[in-house]
Amino acid sequence: MKTIKLITTAVAAMLMAFPSTTKAQELQYGQGYQPEQEENFNDQVEGSVGLDLVSHYMWRGTDKGNVTILPFGQISWNGAFLKLHGATGLDKDDAKEINISLGYKYKFSDYFAVNIGATDYWTSGKDYEGRNLYFEWDPVKNGHQLEANLGFDFGLFSIQGYTMVWGNDFKYEHLDDVENRTNGKRAWSTFIELNIPFYMGGIDWDINAGMTPFESAYIVTPLTSINTLNLVHKEAFYSDKASLIMASVRATKRLEFGDVKVPIFAEMHTNPYMKRANFLIGFSVQPF
């Protein structure tokens, strides 16, 4: 993995050394970044496809792995979009993601727009092995999570709210319930994010802060057993209380090489609640 990280860094450095032109273009992130959609308010259907490569995969303050490939494909029309996006790590044990987003944005003016949408997340991996088939629609047995979102863009800043409304988003308090996926309570896990974009020194900057207003979904896992006393660990999806769970600063240089867009970004991604921080770099490749 160290070799792969060095290769990723070298590729990004070489791209930055080539002559290029910058363009005010929304960066197409993969699932983990809750991608900003490329706006299309035309009457014609437009499509795009590409991929992101990140040195570390961070999502809403959660560490989801090392080097990760994040492919995407999108069609949009008159403010509406349908997007397929996912993630796959380079380690054999990394979970795979397949996600589908559908949304609509209405622009009232240059300083006010409203968007609504929904995303179906699906994750594979050892934790779900044998009980996470993609076409299993029982909300208790499957690994799908359906999230609804509502956002407001004021030009200088935007606010987005996300809530899990269906699927695997429960609170399990007993070990037997975790194993059998029974008696779980719907958590309605919610994430609220503030984004402040600005341009300075030839770089596009984004300051992001995210919080959860209440306890999210969680499961309990065994630590040890002393006679008949079972000691367990409670692991929350976001947090076990209202918390600031993400604060990040991202710098992006948007480059063009012939018919290919290659935005390069670096990001400091922290979780104040968990007292953790990560620094990541990456780039996107998107043909015109």
Image (cartoon, helix red, strand yellow):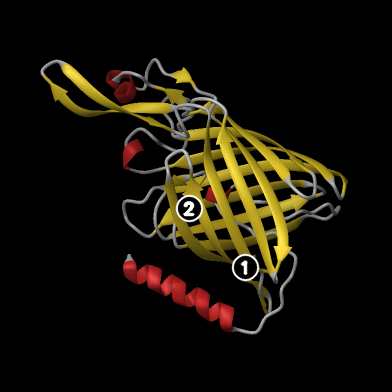
Question: Residue 28: horizontal and vertical position, in percent?
Answer: 63, 58
Locate the N terminus and report the quarter of the image it occupies: bottom left
The answer to whether residue 256 of the structure is visible from this angle is yes
Q: Measure the alpha-carbon separation of dots 1 and 2.
A: 18 Å
Mark 1 neighbour class, 10 Å CA radius: few under 14, some 14 to 19, many 20 or more: many
Question: Residue 57: horizontal and vertical position, in percent?
Answer: 46, 54
Question: Residue 141: horizontal and vertical position, in percent?
Answer: 41, 27
Q: Nearer the viewer, mark 1 or mark 2?
A: 1
Image mark for residue 27: none
In the image, is residue 130 above or below residue 68? above
Locate the C terminus and report the quarter of the image it occupies: bottom right
The answer to whether residue 288 of the structure is visible from this angle is no
> Judging from the image, what secondary structure is the residue with disc 2 in?
strand
Q: Is residue 44 left or right of residue 98?
A: right
Residue under the point 48% across and 60% down: 280
In the image, is residue 126 above or below residue 41? above
Q: Nearer the viewer, residue 231 or 178?
A: 231
Mark 2 neighbour class, 10 Å CA radius: few under 14, some 14 to 19, many 20 or more: many
In the image, is residue 183 above or below residue 118? above
Q: What amino acid is at disc 1?
A: Pro
Task: Residue at the far left: name it.
Answer: 227
Residue where numbered disc 2 is placed: 87
Q: What amino acid is at disc 2?
A: Ala
Residue where numbered disc 1 is placed: 263
Q: Is residue 154 left or right of residue 253?
A: right
> Judging from the image, what secondary structure is the residue with disc 1 in?
loop
In the image, is residue 119 above or below residue 172? below
Asked which quadrant contains residue 173, the reply is: top left
Q: Nearer the viewer, residue 132 or 217?
A: 217
Residue under the point 62% across and 56% down: 73
Label located before the other in sequence (1 or 2):
2
Question: Residue 252: horizontal and vertical position, in percent?
Answer: 62, 65
